[in-house]
Image: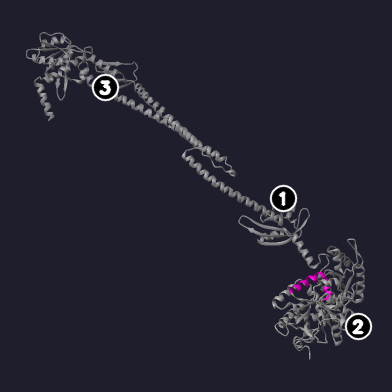
Amino acid sequence: MRNKSLKKILDFLIVLFIFITIIFTYLDMKNITQTLKEMQREKIALIIKNNLSVLNKLLKYGFYDELNSEIRNIVNISNEITGLEIITLKKKFSYFEKEKKENVYIYNTRNVTFKIYYDSHKILKSFFNKYFNRFLIYVLLFSPFVIFIFIYLRNKINKFNILAAKLEKLDFRKVKQIKKIDNFYEIVNIVNAINSLLKRADSFYKMQIQMIRKMIKLKKHLESAQRIAQSFSWEYDCINNNIQISNEFKKFLNAKKNEFTLSEFNKFFPDIDVSYYLNNICKKCLEFETIHILNTLKNKQFNFKTIGKCIKTKKSHYVLCVSLNITESVEKQKMIEFLAYHDPLTGLPNRRKLIEKFEFLASLAKRENKKISLLYLDMDNFKMINDTLGHNSGDEFLKNIARRLKESIRSTDFVARIGGDEFVVLLYDINSKQEAKKVIKKITEVLNKSVNIKNNNIIATFSIGGAIYPDDAENFENLLKYADIAMYEIKEKGKNNYAFIDENIKKYSSDFYKTVDELKKALKNNELVLYFQPKIDIRDNKVYGAEGLIRWNHPERGILSPFHFIPFAEKSGLISKIDEYVLNLAFKTLKKWQNDEKLKHLSLAINISANKFKEEDFVENLKNLLNKHKINPSKLEIEITETLSMDNVEYTISILKQLKFLGFKIALDDFGTGYSSLNYLKTIPFDTLKVDQSFVMDLENDRDDLVITKMIVQIAKVLNKNTVAEGVENEKILNIVKNLGCNLVQGYYFAKPMNEKSFIEFCKNFPHK
Amino acid sequence: MKKFLLILLNITFLFAITDDLLIIEAKLYPKVIMLENKYITSPKMGIIYDEKSQETAEKLKNFLVLNGYTALLMKKDNIKKADGYILTIKNPTYSLIRTLLKTHKLIFGIYPESIKYTMISVYIGPRIKLYVNPKIIKKADIYINPILFKVGKIYEE
C-alpha cells in the first residue's frame, strides 16, 4: 500500500511531467532550430531575390561601386548575413562582416553565382533569447502556481495518510469518532463515511462483545452444569484409534493429558472392554448407551452412564460420547432399595422384607416339611418412654432394642420392625410352641436387661404373641393377625408376657373381623336404628323426652343391642362413624318432632363416645348439622360419660362451652362410677346429672347406694342441675328417687327402649289411664 | 472605364507637358538629389530653358519653390552651378548635354522622351515611375544610389 501511495504517484507524475516537458522542449527546440534555419535560408533567399534585379542591373550596367555598396548594404541591413559573394564569369564581388564563413547559401542565375554567408547562431540566439525570456516569464508566473498545486495536492494526499494512521491506531474496544482532519470536501466525505462505518462497526462490535459474553457465560454455565452434573464429553477417532477427552473429564480422571490410545483408555473401565466396544460401534456406526464402572487414576471408583453416537462424514469418522456420573443416583437407588426393605431407624428389615422372607422360608419349610414360628413383639409402655425422655431417646432405645433383638436370635432366624415399637421374629424350624417358648424366654432375657439412656436406666418389657406356620395359618397375613391378636390378649391381661394363638382367641378374632365387616355394611345399608327410652318428669308425671339408644337391625340376627357390636366398633375405630350416624338420626328425629305439635316439647339425649368427642371437627360437624336441620338445639342433650369428662378436663370444658354456646344441653352419664372432682364439676358446663343405674337398681336393698344417690341428687341441686335416675324398674324405686329429689327418671318401670313409632304412641298415651 | 481614363491621361502626358506633371517632377527630382547626397538637405535645382520652354520653366520653378526648394532658371548657354539640373528644352543640343555631364550632377528632363539625353526623367505607364538612363549616368561618371535601379524604370535603347 505504501509502494503505491498517491503521494509517491504524485511525485512520480511530477518527475514524469518534468521529464516529458524536457524531452518535448528538447525536441521542440530541435524542430524550432531546424525551422529557424530553414526560415533563415528562405529569408536569405528572399533578400537575394528582392535585390537580384538591382544587383543584376548594377552588374549589367557596370555600376560596380554601387554594386559593392549594395552588397555591403545588403550584408549590413541583414542581421543574419555575414557576407555576400557575387561571382560572374569575369569578376568577383564580395563583402564579409566576419572572417569566419560558417554557412553558405548559394544562388545561381544564368551567369552569376551568389554566395551568401550567414550566421545561423545569431538568429537562434535571438530566438532563444526571446524564447527563454518568455519561458522564464512563464516559469516565474506559473511555477508558484504549479508548486502551490503540487504542495496543496501533496498536503491533501497526506491527510489520507493521517487518516490511515488514525484508522491503524483505532482500538475497536474504544471506538472514537475521527475528528475532522481537513475541510476538503472529499476528505470530509470520506471521514464522515468512515465515522458512519465506525459507528456501525462500534455497535456491531458491542453486539458481538455482548454475544461473546453471553456465549462465554453460556459456555461457563454449560461447563459448570457439566461439572455439577458430572457429565463429561469425549470423542473416539475411528480412523486414528485415539480418544480425546474434555478438560473436565481430564480433571475428573486425574489424568495429565487429553489424548489417549485405546489401551490406555481401557484402563479406566474395569468392567467393560472399551476397545472392543468402540470398534464395534465404529464398524456398524451405531448409537449406544451403557452403564459401567469408571476408575480414576487415584483408584476411586464411580458408576457412569455413557451415551454415544457414531458420526461418519466424508472427512471424519468418530464416536461422540457423553459420560454421566451416576454414582450418587446409583447409591441413592441402593438406598431407596434398602429403605424399601428396611427400617431407616434401626436398619432392621421392614414389613415388605418380612413378607418376602416369610414367603421364602414358607416355601422352604413346605419343601422340608418344617415349621416356622412367628412372634409379634410389642414393647410395653413405649409411649411413656417417648413422652418422658423425648423422641430422640425413644429412637435410641429402639435402636438398642433392635440390636439386642438381632443378637438374641439365630442366624437362620429373621427379625423385622413393622411399627413404632412392634417387632416380628421368624423362627425357622421351630416345630412346636414349647420350642418357641424357649426361644421367647431367651429373647426376653436379653431384652429385659436395663438400658442406660440419658442417665436413665430403662427396662423394656414386651408383650409377645405367637403363631405357628402352617398349624395356625398358611399365609402371612393370617399368621401375623393371629400373632397380633395373641399379643393383644397379653396386653389386655397385663402385659410383659407371651402367648400363642389358641382356638378361643381365633374364634373371638373371627367374630371380631366378621362383625366389623358387617358393621361397615350396616352403616352403608342404614341397618342401625335409634330406639327411644322415655324420660319421665316425675314432678308433673309427663314425658320429658327420651334417650336415644342404638340398635342394629341385623338382617339375619334381628335387633341387636349395643353390647353385641359396640366393643368391636370401639376396637376397630368404627365407633366414630357410628356416632356420626346416630347424630344424623337424632337431628332428623328432632326435626320431625318439632314439626309435630304434640311432640315438639320432647328432648332427645344421645350418647357420644370418647373418640368422637375428641375429634377436632366434632363441634364444627354439630354446627353444620344444626345449620342443615334447623332444630331447636336446647332439645338435643349430648351425654358424655363422667370418665370421659374427667379424662382431660380443660379440653372437655372448652368443647362443652362451645356446645353450650351453640345451645345444646349437656348431660353427665353414668355419674358416680368415675372419679369426679367436685372442683372440676363446678366448672364443667353441664345441665343434667344422670345417676348410674347400678346405684338406682338396688336402692331398695342397699343403703350405700341410697346414700350415694342422695348425695348425687344433693350435688345436682346445689349446682342447680337436673338429675335423671336411670334403671327405675319398680314403683318402690320410683318413690325412693322421688323422695330423694330426683326430677327425671327412666327405666323399665315406665318403658323399655322402643322404636320411634311405639315411642310416639307412648308419648301420646302417657300417662296411662 | 478606369483603364480608359488612365490611358487617356497617359496620352495627355505623353504629348504635352501639363502642370500636374510639373508638380510631380517638382516634388520628385529634389528628393532624388537628396537620396544621392545625404548632406544636401535643400537642393538647389537649376532649370535650363530656352525661349520655347521659358514659361514651363518658370512654372516648374514656382512649383519647386512652393515645395521649399531653391530653383534657378538658367538659359541653355548660361549654365550655373547647381545641385542638379532640370532640362525643359525638348531637343537639347549635344554640347549642352556634354556641358552638363561635366558638372557631374544629375540631369533631369521634364519630358518623358527627354530620357534619351538626360539621366532621369519621368516614365508614364500604369504607374508613374522615375525613368533612369544608365548610359548617361555612366557617362557623367557619378555615383548614384542603387535604389534608383530598384524603384525606377531603366531606359534601354
Query: Which is more N-terminal, label 2 or label 3?
Result: 3
Quadrant of res A226: bottom right
Residue at position x 73%, y 50% in the image:
A256
The answer to whether residue B23 is visible is yes
Question: Circle 1 is placed at which residue position?
Answer: A257
Q: Amino acid at mark 3?
A: Ile
State the CA–CA distance, disc 3 to disc 1.
Answer: 112 Å
Question: Circle 3 is placed at which residue position?
Answer: A48
State the CA–CA distance, disc 3 to disc 2.
Answer: 201 Å
Left or right of A109: which side holds A310?
right
Q: Which residues are magenta?
A: A641-662
Question: Circle 2 is placed at which residue position?
Answer: A702
Pointer 2 indicates a residue of which chain? A
Q: Along the line of sight, which residue is nearer the eye, A67 or A451? A: A451
Q: Position of residue A40 (x, y in %)?
A: 31, 24
Residue at position x 11%, y 28% in the image:
B4
Q: Give residue A547's mark.
A: none
What secondary structure is marked by label 3? Answer: helix
Q: Along the line of sight, which residue is nearer the eye, B59 or A78? A: B59
Other-residue count near label 1 (Cα within 10 Å), few / some / many at <14 / 14–19 / ≥20: few
Instruction: Say which of marks 3 and 1 sits in front.
Output: 1
Q: Along the line of sight, which residue is nearer the eye, A585 or A281? A: A585
Marks 3 and 1 belong to one chain = yes
The image quadrant where one finds the C terminus of chain A is bottom right
What secondary structure is marked by label 2? Answer: loop
Q: Position of residue A70 (x, y in %)?
A: 25, 17
Q: Is residue A549 above or below residue A292?
A: below
Other-residue count near label 3 (Cα within 10 Å), few / some / many at <14 / 14–19 / ≥20: some
Q: Is residue A291 above or below residue A33?
A: below
